[in-house]
Amino acid sequence: MQEQTDYSNALYAARCIADHAVGEGILRANVPVRPVYHHMGAVLADSVLQAGLNYSTIVRPRVQAILEIFPHATTLNAVTQIIETQGSGKFLQWRHEEKVSRFDDLVEFLVGSRIEDTSDLSEALLDDAFRIDIREVRGIGPKTVDYMACLVGVDCIAVDRHIRGFAELAGLEEDGYDFLRDTFSFAADLLSISRREFDASIWHFQATKNSRQLFLDFDCTPSSEI
């Protein structure tokens, strides 16, 4: 069951987010936006692998390998043929059963929904009923749905730990998924930038901030005496 957003509160919170973003100067950074894929294999692999894994060192290399090794996997039909002949684990370059099984379940759901390419998927992800149905796939939550939507060019926010961390810095107390997604979406609208661009700017700001803090924490840790 999806939560209901209080839009008046979300609009007020959006102003707080927008003001904080301007104050931190995060909009001045030239940050690359998450790529839009026209390749079903890459979209589905990226969507399934990204949760809980380091994107730069684990996910991105595997997605890039799929684009290079399976350039023809632009349609769901092509993906299913590869799975039948080579297996999902080889396609994903991943052995852990949980994500491989999730990938297979997602492919099965999309086949049943008559989704063939990224254009079909982009259109379907604009439909609330489809968004509810796809979350019936085990392991596919609201963040994965929004993340997948971003990959096929839908202008939206995927609420991850970086979004939540930025919301906390801006003083927001409510942390429901739909509330934060709507709040950050409205904030991007107030700032007259795309939601995907705002998402990328916050991700870069928070990732850089966290990396710098980890370095300082390590550098300030006293050495143990021998």
Image (tube, grey):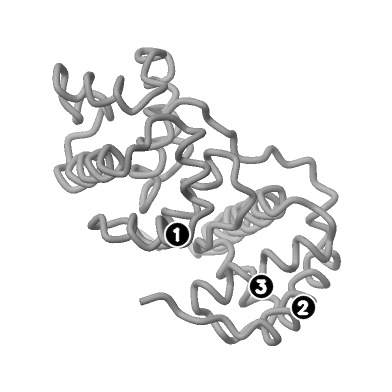
Q: In this view, does 180 lie to the left or right of 137?
A: right
Q: Which mark is residue 183?
A: 3
The residue shown at (60%, 61%) is 213
Residue 140 percent coordinates (x, y): 32, 56
The residue beneath circle 1 is 143
Amino acid of disc 3: Thr
User: Upstream in the sequence, badge 1 or badge 3?
Assistant: 1
Q: Distance between the residues labelled 2 and 3?
A: 9 Å
Q: How far apart are marks 1 and 3 (CA)?
A: 15 Å
Amino acid of disc 1: Lys
Amino acid of disc 2: Cys
Answer above or below: position of 15 versus 200: below
Q: Are marks 2 and 3 in contact (CB under 8 Å)?
A: no
How many numbered circles does the render carry? 3
Residue 102 percent coordinates (x, y): 23, 47
The residue beneath circle 2 is 16
Q: Is residue 125 left or right of residue 207?
A: left
Numbered disc 2: secondary structure: helix
Residue 178 percent coordinates (x, y): 52, 73
The residue shown at (70%, 77%) is 170
> Which quadrant of the figure contains the N terminus?
bottom left
Numbered disc 1: secondary structure: helix
